[in-house]
Image: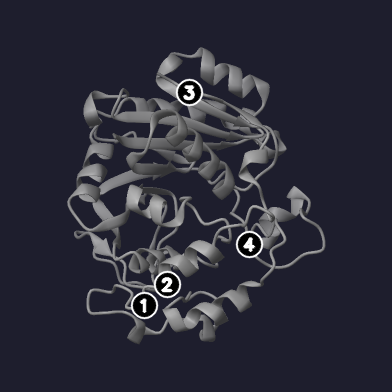
Amino acid sequence: MSKLCAVYNVCGIGGRDTQVLTYYIDCIRSLLSQDIFGGPGDDYKIAISGCMSSDPVQQTLQLLTFGEHLSYNWIEEPLPLSVTFNDTVDHMVKHFGPFDGYLYVDSGISFWDPSGRYDALKNLWDVHQNGPYAITAAMPSNDDGSSWWGIQYRPDEDYVFPVGKATNMHCQIFSEDWRKAYNKVLPDIFASNCMESTFSNMCAAIHRKYVITQKVHLLHNHSMDGASIGSREIDNDKIPMSSIFQTGGLLYKTKKTIDERFQEGHEYGMGIEECKDYWRHDPDKFDSEGYAKDERLAPFLARELYLKSEEFDYSSIKGMFTPGR
């Protein structure tokens, strides 16, 4: 089994990708420069996940020195980031087999280290491998206390998030046992700044933890991608992309509202902290390690945070996947 699949997520909705192409190139080169596992090869695969990417961007990235080291998944329709990332991971697993970990990299993240070191990814991987972690996050340069849901963070220590706490999702490694438990990596039914504490809940459900490390600080100079899918019922299957950023990515109609989901899952331990008081998790549903006591929580989350095939069919996504070597 290969060790790490890194997915760099780019977005061309609204034609904005041509404006930041130089930044994309710099960020991708920073991933290629990492000294983990001797560079890209059998154990370290890099994929570009592009939604609505323009022809100039596609051609430039594929014609540069990145060559056959990289895989490309060019998606031709406007889809939320959670869906495009999951689709790219699915393609990589089908072609190369499962990986030990899956690295989500926001398009605004660069692995260049101002000190000239090239071991940021290795350090992140070492932390991930040396703990009971389902999610291992790096510290982005523009995150501060407001991104931590009120947590008093110690800058000299790694921090394991308790159930109900989280940080913004910019650069994380997800474990293979997370993917196996939930079938996909990022939840489909998810809205940025509304459900991010769900990730610590999902870790606890599979008896793993969510850590952010101070050993890896990354540059995050741009915010270029929209939120993921929400779960409010709407009249049509899709709403205009121009509304995505104002609605938290409420893109697909589902049979249940988010309120109904949390009312059903609360007895298993499901909860989020950012929205309504009665959605908060029940601490008594978790043991001293912060793990869920109720074995029904993980399958419930797998059912309720991911779209059913009749709601969204991943196999119908229009695009082209080109595997690297």
Give the percent coordinates (x, y) of residue 79. 66, 44
The answer for how far apart the CA atoms under marks 1 and 4 are is 26 Å
When the figure is inspected, residue 6 is found, relative to residue 216, above or below; the finding is: above
User: Which dot marks residue 98?
Assistant: none
Amino acid type, mark 2: Leu
Q: Secondary structure at mark 1?
A: loop
Give the label, 4 or 3, closer to the camera.
Answer: 3
- Looking at the image, is mark 1 or mark 4 earlier in the sequence? 4
The answer for how far apart the CA atoms under marks 4 and 3 are is 31 Å
The residue identified by callout 1 is 294
Give the percent coordinates (x, y) of residue 89. 47, 39
The residue identified by callout 2 is 297
Give the label, 1 or 4, closer to the camera.
Answer: 1
The residue identified by callout 4 is 230
Amino acid type, mark 1: Asp
Left or right of 244 on screen, residue 216: left
